[in-house]
Amino acid sequence: MTSKTDLKWPIPESVSEVEHYMKQRVGLGVSFDLNLRKLKIFKKEVHIYSVSGLVDTIYAIQLVKELVDLNNIEKLSSKNIGELIENRLVNQSVQPVKKLDELIEKVLSGLIGVVVEGEDTAYVVDVRSYPGRSPQEPDTEKVVRGARDGFVENIIMNTALIRRRIRDPRLRYEMIRVGERSKSDVAVAYLEDVADPDLLSVIRKELKAIEVDGLPMADKTIEEFLINQGFNPFPLVRYTERADIAAAHILEGHVIIIVDTSPSVIIAPATFFHHIQHAEEFRESPSLGTFVRWTRFLGVWVSIFLLPLWLLFVLEPSLLPEKMSFIGPNQQTNIPIVLQIFLADFGIEFLRMAAIHTPTPLSTAMGLIAAVLIGQIAISVGLFVPEVILYVAVSGIGSFTTPSYELSVANKIARMLMLILVAIFHTPGFVIGSTILLIFLVYTRALNTPYFWPFIPFEPKGFLQIVIRRAVPGSMLRPSVVHPRNRYRQPPNQQ
């Protein structure tokens, strides 16, 4: 039985010893997907290791044919058999390896490993063909106009989608393997002459310091190691499944973290206002994009403050102007209004969860049942007053206008806490809740980045870019919040 340190040894010159290691440590002969093909070339044993389902079978067969054809060449010396075999591996990616653990890791990653008798060097050939789906538009980031290709679960395809949009030779993909057992591929993407070196150092250090068995939850696990979030509900990094959004952030100076098996990537650093931007704003003219952005801001505000403000007016009608005195329930109920709000709010959350888990053909029927039967009957029997349903529904729509799902849920939690404060303290509760929320967002930092930038700390140019969707020819400077090494997106003389 080999120990963990045995795998750090150089590759033995005896192919049978390598086979023994593979049987003892990797499960060759037990796991059905582990393959060993034995060849004899110039009376020398050559073993080829691979994993079914992760390699392209056609390429693998072609490589075996090339190696077998060596025996048909006469008057060829077998003294440099390793060099001859390396030259016959007709592939754009052939890498010699010297350590046994590296060979095993490459084979389990989907590469083909070629071991030659009498040689202390093995060769790995990249003929990976991971199972996966074709790029398609993400369900959560749809646009009226724009690209329809989104990230998939294949890290090679995801990096290619970004490379297609940024053909700059200074675009870098640094590969780091994370997970003692999973050895998952994690790529850090950035522009070498733009990204902040300090941010890159922090991300590299945190990724290399991760000690965990594996990454079954992929990018979410990486985020929890990278960001010490604790119980802060607000998202401190941004996720996207769109390649154009990822490319746009790389050009701004952000760093993208791509994790194999995940169709979404991490954008760092990210502020509160990064989470309420959407690609649709940049696919329209600046005026229309600004209108869409303001509408979205209004939806986010409504999702947080509408219900607490309405509850405050219900509890203290004297705060309302005479012309708005119609606001508030016109009938008495046995259930307190605040309890009705919470019941209706949780009811919408139940419906959202049910919609996720309901098969598509049944989701329409479920929506009709929820809207017609449950809502109408609940009002008829006196469980809810109509205004509660109205304002809870409008607040829910405001949550759906928030592009970031994580931020919409965080806003819902903030809204519920404010409702509790308003129900207990009335007007002081609303003021205290709003102040605590603002202070909390101001003091939150993500990767040493102020979460509420550019409002606090205030930066006029950044504030203008947030409020108004400017035309690309007028956006000369990259956002200062990412500390780019090169501030100019365009030469200054093109202003």
Image (cartoon, rainbow, N blue to C red):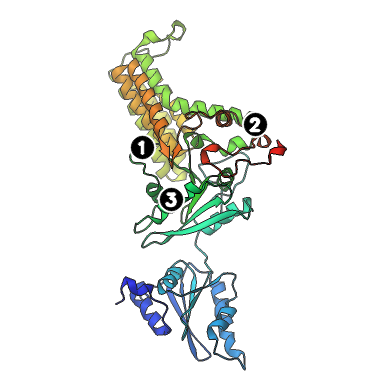
Quarter of the image where the C terminus is located: top right
Q: Is residue 246 above or below residue 445?
A: below
Q: Position of residue 38 (x, y in %)?
A: 47, 83
Q: Are marks 3 and 1 in contact (CB under 8 Å)?
A: no
Q: Is residue 195 visible?
A: yes
Pointer 2 local density, CA inside 10 Å: few below 14, some 14–19, many at least 20: some
Distance of mark 2 from mark 1, alpha carbons? 34 Å
Q: Tell whether 236 sits left or right of 419.
A: right
Residue most toward the bottom? 75
Q: Residue at x 37, y 58 (%)?
A: 214
Q: Residue at x 44, y 7 (%)?
A: 321
Q: Nearer the viewer, mark 3 or mark 1?
A: 1
Most foreground residue, 200 or 411: 200
- Kindly identify which numbered label has been placed on residue 419: none
Q: How many numbered tags mark residues here?
A: 3
Q: Position of residue 273 (x, y in %)?
A: 50, 34
The amino acid type, in three-letter code, at marker 1 is Asn
Pointer 1 local density, CA inside 10 Å: few below 14, some 14–19, many at least 20: few
The amino acid type, in three-letter code, at marker 3 is Asp
- Residue at the spot of label 2: 286
Quarter of the image where the N terminus is located: bottom left
Mark 2 and mark 1 lie on one chain; the one further toward the N terminus is: 1
- Kindly identify which numbered label has been placed on residue 232: 1
Most foreground residue, 241 or 462: 462
What is the quadrant of residue 475 in the picture? top right
Pointer 3 local density, CA inside 10 Å: few below 14, some 14–19, many at least 20: many
